[in-house]
Image (cartoon, helix red, strand yellow):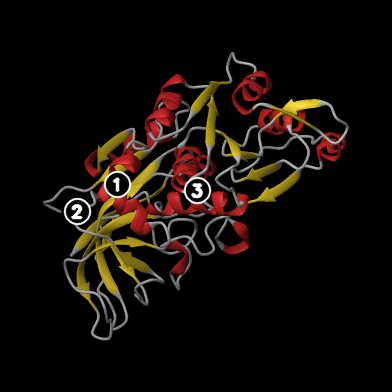
């Protein structure tokens, strides 16, 4: 029996191919994928036309998708704690054959996904049946967002600004408010994204396409100063979920003494004013992936599923998966695109 799977094709395009439906070994389960998100990593592989994983670094097709959620349909004889019909979310970094959807042998944007060495709490986690599959598919990116907030060590009394109202930035805003942080501002250049930021709990927003960020932060967070006593906004933590050089420049120009900058977005090349960092004794914190957070998020994702659902701008059926990738890779066209799989698969 065959199934359909999505992989990179020509530069900027996907291919939908037919593969044999896998059968689980004694330690595996077979997941019927019911929803899978599209990530910026997918777009990177699309723009490259694959990945340099062949012999001698030659470009090869890459199976796409690492934000999968679904229903177990077959369970290996030695697997415990799981049964057919269970709803689960996936840890794409736990696959023995390589990370799912980012250059490994398997991708999550397919009708059926083999979960190798299936262990609850390691390779997958149960999620209540009441949670829509498209919301469950947010588990992995929300783990990335939570790790950035954990790295910030934000306290309830802190005043925070998040740059970038994409899924990671909005997820960070949600986690900050669930953590009890006093005041969270979200900055972006797209008005509809700022509306979503307010809807998910941000205390204020800044449209950085025309507003003076430093002046607005001072208005919202009060007056602070850098190590030289120069006036600066009272913002304690800056989270960069945008990856634009302007974010670094704005932070360096605005940071008060002992402020923090958490870098979670993939950075573009830029020059950093190290003298400005010195004047504020700014702490730069890098945030990569989710060392422990992949399933820490799952209970709260379930508890606050309606809030997280607001991050999804487009739900596209798998029959139109090429349109979904076009949406996700067109700047400003979508916030979060989730591909859903029909009940009659």
Asked whether residue 287 is in view, the answer is no
What crowding class fits label 3: few (fewer than 14 Cα within 10 Å), some (14-19), or many (20 or more)?
many
Q: Secondary structure at mark 1?
A: helix
Residue 78 seen in the current view: yes
Q: Residue at x 32, y 47 (%)?
A: 304
Query: Closer to the N terminus: mark 1 or mark 3?
Result: 3
Depth check, front residue: 158 or 128: 158
Residue underneath mark 3: 145
Q: Which residue is mark 1?
A: 305
SS type, badge 3:
helix
**Seen in the image, is 109 located left or right of residue 224?**
left
Q: Residue at x 44, y 60 (%)?
A: 294
The x, y position of residue 45, in whole percent, is: 50, 46
Report the disc number at residue 130: 2
Q: Are marks 1 and 2 in contact (CB under 8 Å)?
A: yes
Distance, label 1 to label 2, CA atoms, is 9 Å
Tell me if residue 32 comes above or below residue 178 in the rendering.
below
Give the residue displayed 51% in from the left and 64% down from the top. 292
Q: Residue furthest top?
A: 210
Place of residue 35 in the rendered image (x, y in percent of width and height, measured from the top left)? 28, 50
Mark closest to the chain's N terminus, 3 or 2: 2
Which part of the image, by quadrant, shows the N terminus?
Answer: bottom left
Tell me the quadrant of the picture where the C terminus can be found: bottom left
Tell me whether circle 1 and circle 3 mark residues in contact (CB < 8 Å).
no
Q: Residue at x 63, y 25 (%)?
A: 217
Q: In the image, is 187 to the left or to the right of 122?
A: right
- Crowding at dot 1, Cα within 10 Å, few <14 / some 14-19 / many 20+, comes out as some
Looking at marks 1 and 2 on the same chain, the residue that comes earlier in the sequence is marked by 2
Q: Is residue 313 above or below residue 303?
A: above
């Amino acid at each position: 029996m065959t199934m359909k799977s999505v992989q990179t094709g020509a530069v900027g395009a996907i291919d939908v191919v037919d593969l044999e439906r896998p059968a689980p070994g004694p330690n595996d389960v077979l997941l019927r994928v019911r929803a899978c998100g599209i990530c910026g990593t997918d777009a990177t592989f699309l723009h490259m036309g694959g990945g340099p994983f062949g012999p001698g670094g030659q470009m090869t097709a890459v199976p796409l998708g690492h934000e999968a959620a679904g229903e177990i349909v077959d369970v290996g004889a030695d697997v415990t704690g799981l049964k057919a019909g269970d709803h689960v979310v996936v840890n794409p970094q736990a696959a023995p054959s390589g990370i799912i959807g980012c250059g490994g042998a398997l991708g999550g944007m397919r009708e059926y996904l083999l979960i190798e060495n299936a262990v609850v709490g390691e390779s997958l986690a149960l999620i209540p049946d009441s949670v829509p599959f498209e919301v469950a598919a947010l588990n992995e990116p929300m783990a990335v967002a939570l790790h950035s907030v954990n790295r910030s060590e934000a306290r309830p009394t802190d005043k925070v600004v998040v740059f970038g109202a994409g899924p990671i930035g909005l997820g960070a805003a949600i986690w900050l408010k669930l953590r009890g942080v006093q005041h969270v501002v979200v900055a972006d250049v797209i008005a509809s994204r700022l509306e979503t930021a307010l809807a998910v709990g941000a205390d204020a927003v800044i449209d950085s396409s025309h507003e003076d960020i430093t002046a607005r932060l001072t208005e919202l967070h009060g007056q602070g100063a850098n190590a030289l006593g120069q006036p600066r906004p009272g913002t304690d933590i800056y989270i960069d979920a945008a990856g634009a050089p302007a974010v670094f420049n704005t932070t360096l120009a605005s940071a008060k003494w002992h402020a923090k900058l958490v870098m979670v977005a993939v950075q573009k090349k830029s020059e950093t004013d190290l003298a400005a960092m010195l004047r504020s004794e700014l702490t730069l914190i890098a945030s990569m992936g989710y060392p422990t957070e992949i399933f820490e998020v799952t209970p709260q994702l379930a508890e606050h599923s309606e809030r997280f659902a607001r991050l999804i701008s487009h739900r596209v059926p798998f029959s139109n998966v090429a349109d979904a990738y076009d949406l996700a890779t067109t700047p400003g066209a979508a916030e979060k695109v989730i591909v859903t799989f029909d009940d009659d698969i």
